[in-house]
Image: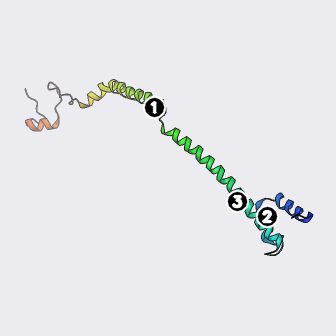
Amino acid sequence: MEKSDNDKQFIARLEAMTLQQARRELASGTYGALGSPNHNYASQWLLVKEAEEQDKRDMINKEQSSQIHDRLVDLKKPHWSLTPSFIVILLTMLFAAIAAWPIIRAWFQPSPSVNINSSFQSPQSCLKTGTQGEQKK
C-alpha cells in the first residue's frame, strides 16, 4: 500500500510536533472528526509515541535506581578512617580525664575544717556556750 503525498505530509507534520502539541491538536479536532481515518491514525501514532516515551523514562529510572543501589551498597561499608578516629577520640578523652583529675578530686574532698584558734565566733557557737557577747578569761 503506497502512501500518498497527503499522507506523507500528514505523517511529517505529526513527527515534527511534540507529544503535548499532538494531544492538543487531536483534542481540538484538527485531524477530523472522531472515527475519521486521519483522527484514528493520529491517535494511534500518539499512543505509540507515548509508549516510546514511557519506555525511555522507564529505562532512565532503571539506570538511576541501579546507580542508587550501587551507592547504597558502598555506604554499607564503614569509611576507613572510622576506627582510627574512634581510637584517637578515646585517647583524647582519657588524657582529658587525667588532666582534669586534680580539679575533680577537689570536688569530692570534705570542706576544710574550721580553725579553732580563731578569734571570731559565729552567733551559733555563742548561743551554745551561753556567752553572748561575753569573752572568756
Tell me which label, 3 or 2, sits earlier in the chain: 2
Disc 1 target residue = 82
Disc 3 target residue = 51
Q: Amino acid at mark 1?
A: Leu
Mark 3 or 1: in front is 3
Looking at the image, is 38 positioned above or below residue 110?
below
Q: State the image quarter where residue 23 is shown.
A: bottom right
Q: Position of residue 9 (x, y in %)?
A: 89, 62
Q: Residues within 10 Å of mark 2 (few under 14, many from 20)?
A: many
Q: Position of residue 52 (x, y in %)?
A: 72, 57
Q: Does 126 sit left or right of 40 as displayed?
A: left
Q: Amino acid at mark 3?
A: Ala
Q: Residues within 10 Å of mark 3 (few under 14, many from 20)?
A: few
Pick the residue in front: 92 or 49: 49
Q: Residue at coordinates 20% horizontally, 28% vertically from top-left?
A: 112
Mark 3 vs 2: CB contact within 8 A: no
Give the SS element for disc 1.
helix
Give the SS element for disc 3.
helix
Q: Which mark is residue 22?
A: 2
Q: State the image quarter where residue 10 is shown.
A: bottom right
Q: Position of residue 45 (x, y in %)?
A: 77, 63
Pick the residue in front: 77 or 95: 77
Q: Residues within 10 Å of mark 1 (few under 14, many from 20)?
A: few
Distance from disc 3 to disc 2, alpha carbons, whole Å, reads 14 Å
Q: Position of residue 99 (x, y in %)?
A: 34, 24
Quadrant position of the N terminus in the picture: bottom right
Tell me which label, 1 or 2, sits earlier in the chain: 2
Mark 1 vs 2: CB contact within 8 A: no
Pick the residue in front: 15 or 118: 15
Looking at the image, is 38 positioned above or below residue 104?
below
Give the SS element for disc 2.
helix
